[in-house]
Amino acid sequence: MKRIFFIALIGILFSSAFAGPTITVKVEIGKKKINGQPVTGCPQFGFCRISIENIGAGTENMSKGTLQVSDDAKSVTIGIQEADILRYQPDKINYFQKKTSVTFDEDFVFPEDINNAAKASKPLVIKAGTYPLSYKDGIYYITFTL
């Protein structure tokens, strides 16, 4: 029994040693550009803006989320609260409900403050592509490979 406990403890410590910090962020869903051309209102699906929570004006109507970088897995996981999507951008919920993946049509480059807070070893970029989407306890999780 002690051996099982010790192995489990080592596993937990080992797995958390390589995960980056969890950062509370605000997310605006949509795209700033379509086919390379600027658009207003951030239509369609993507990330229009991501900010560290409570930094700067204009984040009060953005969905609350979390961001965690895993250098060992070379991935970023973003969690976005369903209640906030419904409250601030209800037209975007159809990109999440009953879905198992999301598709980004264009690359998204994270702002420098997010890179710094995540202690990323290199700039974080979500490449255009399809990524898994999961849902648990009122939160949608998207995991991106770096």
Image (cartoon, rainbow, N blue to C red):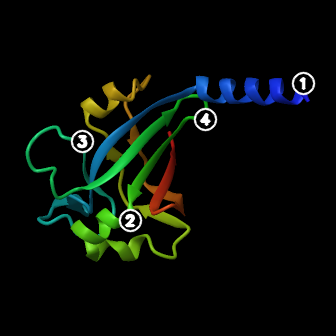
Q: Which residue is mark 3?
A: 53
Q: Which residue is mark 1?
A: 3
Nearer to us in this view, 145 or 114: 114
Give the CA separation, mark 2 to mark 1: 41 Å
Residue 90 on image: x %, y %: 27, 74
Marks 2, 1: nearer the viewer: 1
Nearer to us in this view, 88 or 38: 88
> In terms of secondary structure, where does tag 1 sit?
helix
| Residue at 47% across, 35% down | 69
Q: Is residue 22 left or right of residue 36?
A: right
Q: Which residue is mark 2?
A: 82
**In terms of sequence position, does the residue under pointer 3 or pointer 2 come before the other?**
3
| Residue at 37% across, 36% down | 23
**In terms of sequence position, does the residue under pointer 2 or pointer 4 come before the other?**
4
Q: Which residue is mark 4?
A: 73
The amino acid on which the numbered mark 2 sits, given as a three-letter code, is Glu
